[in-house]
Image (cartoon, rainbow, N blue to C red):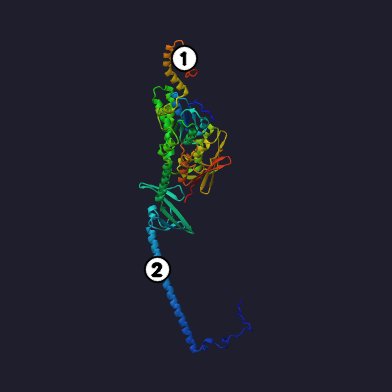
Amino acid sequence: MMTPINTDFPVILVEDDEDLREAIAVTLRLNHIDFVTHQRAESVLPLLQPGLKTVLITDYRLPGMNGLDLLKLALKEIPDLPVIVMTAFADAKLAVEALKAGARDFLIKPFVPDQLIEIITRYRPPSSAIEAMVASQMLSPLTSVIELQLPHHALNDPLTSGVVNPVC
Amino acid sequence: MPISPPHLPSTMPKSPASEAEDPTLQLMPNQLAEAFALFYEESKKLESQQANLQEKINQLTQELYDSNHRLGILLNAIPAGVVLLENNIVSLHNPSVLNFLPQIVIGQALTLPTDWQASIAPGEYLIESPSGRRTVQLVRIDEGSRSIVQIQDISANIHLHQQSQQENRLAAMGKMAASIAHQFRTPLATALLYSSHLCDERIAADQSKEFAERLRKQLLGLEKLSQDMLRFITNRPRKSELVPIASIVQTAEQGIRPLCEKKGVQLLSHVNIAKDLLVNVEQQAIVNALLAILENALAVSESGKQITISGTSQSQRVTITIEDQGPGIPQTMIDSLFEPFSTGHSNGTGLGLAIAKNALEAHRGSIHAENYAQGARFTITLPCMNSL
């Protein structure tokens, strides 16, 4: 059995239209969000390993395998992967179909940058680095209190040692 | 030299009458009465037969008169014009002809008014008048030195045909609602993202300029798409004119050649059509149809490959083929190739080939696609003009 590994991964974006792909890339870059882009669903399949922590945003209509099939395959590998389906056709049947298949949300084309960023930040799982950072930040006042009380003992912090600089 | 009377051979058997001087005088009175009675009887029979025949003749004459009368009523009543020609001279015509040819004169040759423009099909003419546009069809039947010319107004038929074609296209569009949404909203999404960034004050000036450029490109694409969509729905020849088919092919070639050179694709032309062979078409529509096929061919051609245009003409029809050396048309697409938004590649509006097919069919032409050993081959045909 494959051991799930906690892998932080850039946001995965699947869109066949070159111009829209580039426009979304620009938007993500301006908002300092790491991402990888793909033209086709098929090329995303090798990335889908258990434990992958990211958001997958895919266009519904793609040449070859469509977004819905990609969604199903992705959730088979990673059941808790947040998948967002982009579509130009706001059809109720399609929405129900995708939500039934496990899509976390919808992005109806056209959308403004804020909608895209909001949906990514809402569903993107906190990266282990950020988790560690937040934890260390929450811990640091506590640590200093303890350090004050125990001035001669450096506290060995199991959460932060070797991961991030606890000072930040 | 006098001719001697024929000499009867002595061996000829002698008839009984030859024994008397005049055989008729030898008849008995009762025989005479008998013969007379017989003759009288026969002549009575003949008389009654003749009376019967006369009656039949009268009856047939009446029938002929009636049917002529009916034919006359019919010819006077029908909206179509009928002209009878003897050696190309008008000998008879019905009143309806005056609706089409008010200047027709019995005893003179049949001539068509100068404002009758040849339409897309042989024998069809367009007449523009302040009251509107009419399409008239002329059918000529020759029988020896006689000809019958029938003239009828087919505007209503043509209108109905166009209407049903348009309804079909609208129905096709209805089925394509999802594709249309995709086709419009994807560039719209791109445009909306860039325009939003342009409103963002944190964006540097040089970046703004680039975003504005990209926004403009999307807007132009959307404009072309809406234009194509309208062209697809309302496709019909607007103003047709007689144009040499060779020059139409040449215009299309000139349009695509720079793009071929840019991509390193060789464009070969083997157009074997007389320079003065005319087609009656809306020129730009046919040039666009050829360009759509050529653009398609170029999109699937790699550098170093060839695109070949050939043209031939055969009795009243021209055939133009465009062959590429690309991967060929996928089997799954060959049936739906000319339907809107069926193309495989995401550049272009997805309407080019659908519009090309509409345009050619509106000109009574055809388009056909197939694969051959080295790639894909598109064949189009168009009727060329012959005058009546």
Q: Amino acid at mark 1?
A: Leu
> Of B376 and B149, which appears nearest the observer?
B376
Give residue B98's position: percent from left, percent from top.
38, 54
Q: Is residue B304 visible?
A: yes
Q: Is residue B102 visible?
A: no
Is label 2 on the same chain as label 1? no
Instruction: Name the quadrant containing residue A123.
Output: top left
**Residue appearing at x 44%, y 50% in the figure:** B124
Q: Give the vertical position of B7 relative to A64 (above or below).
A: below
Q: Which residue is under mark 2?
A: B62
Q: Amino acid at mark 2?
A: Gln
For the C terminus of chain A, the quadrant is: top left
C-alpha span from label 2 to label 1? 132 Å
Give residue B233's position: percent from left, percent from top.
42, 42
Give residue A10's position: percent from left, percent from top.
48, 26
Chain letter of the residue beneath label 1 in the structure image: A
Give residue B372's position: percent from left, percent from top.
57, 42
Q: Which residue is under mark 1?
A: A155
Q: Secondary structure at mark 1?
A: loop
Chain letter of the residue beneath label 2 in the structure image: B
Q: Secondary structure at mark 2?
A: helix
> Of B288 and B30, which appears nearest the observer?
B288
**Disc number placed over residue B88 in the picture, else none:** none
**Residue appearing at x 41%, y 73% in the figure:** B55
For the N terminus of chain A, the quadrant is: top right
> Of B351 and B266, which appears nearest the observer?
B351
A65 left or right of A111? right
Q: Give the vertical position of B68 relative to B11 (above or below).
A: above
